[in-house]
Image (cartoon, rainbow, N blue to C red):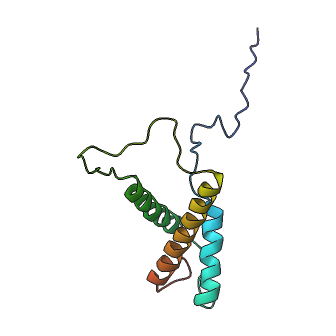
Amino acid sequence: METETITPEVTSSDSVNHVPRDYNEAVIRRYALKVSEETRAGKYTRVSEQFIIDVEAEVEALLRKLRQPAVAFNGKIVDVPEGEEFLTGAGKKKLAEATNIAIASIIHRKTKDIRTGKTF
């Protein structure tokens, strides 16, 4: 008797290696190459995975600073009650815009650090 092997279809959400990303790598790469075009006469034509990792690490460091616990005047840790949000949709949009500007600034700074080769 022959047995039939059924292989389940694997979608990207089922993949063992699927990790949700916080950052849009394609946009980071495009922007770094745009900076190269504007500031380095297009000298750099590729963006390495390490460049992306370094940008993400700097953004994470910036976010950690924002998340550091603060101490109130009475000595207690400042906390936000569960379920409460201080920002409205418009406030979140402004925060996202400010964060994007900070990320662009990080990319600009990192493009100046590299001096040789064709890859950021």
Does 107 appear above or below 15? below
Residue 36's quadrant in the figure? Answer: bottom right
Front residue of 56 and 14: 56
- Residue furthest to the front in view is 74
Q: Quadrant of the N terminus?
A: top right
Work out whether residue 38 can be spotted. yes
Q: Is 17 situated left or right of 57 in this image?
A: right
Residue 90's quadrant in the figure? Answer: bottom right
- Residue 85 pos. (x, y %): 53, 44
Does 56 appear above or below 31? above
> What residue lies at 52% left-to-right and 48% top-to-bottom?
86
Q: Is 78 situated left or right of 120 in this image?
A: left
- Residue 110 pos. (x, y %): 47, 76
Q: Is 52 situated left or right of 31 in this image?
A: left
Q: Is 106 situated left or right of 64 in this image?
A: right
- Residue furthest to the bottom in view is 41
> What residue lies at 65% left-to-right and 66% top-to-bottom?
27
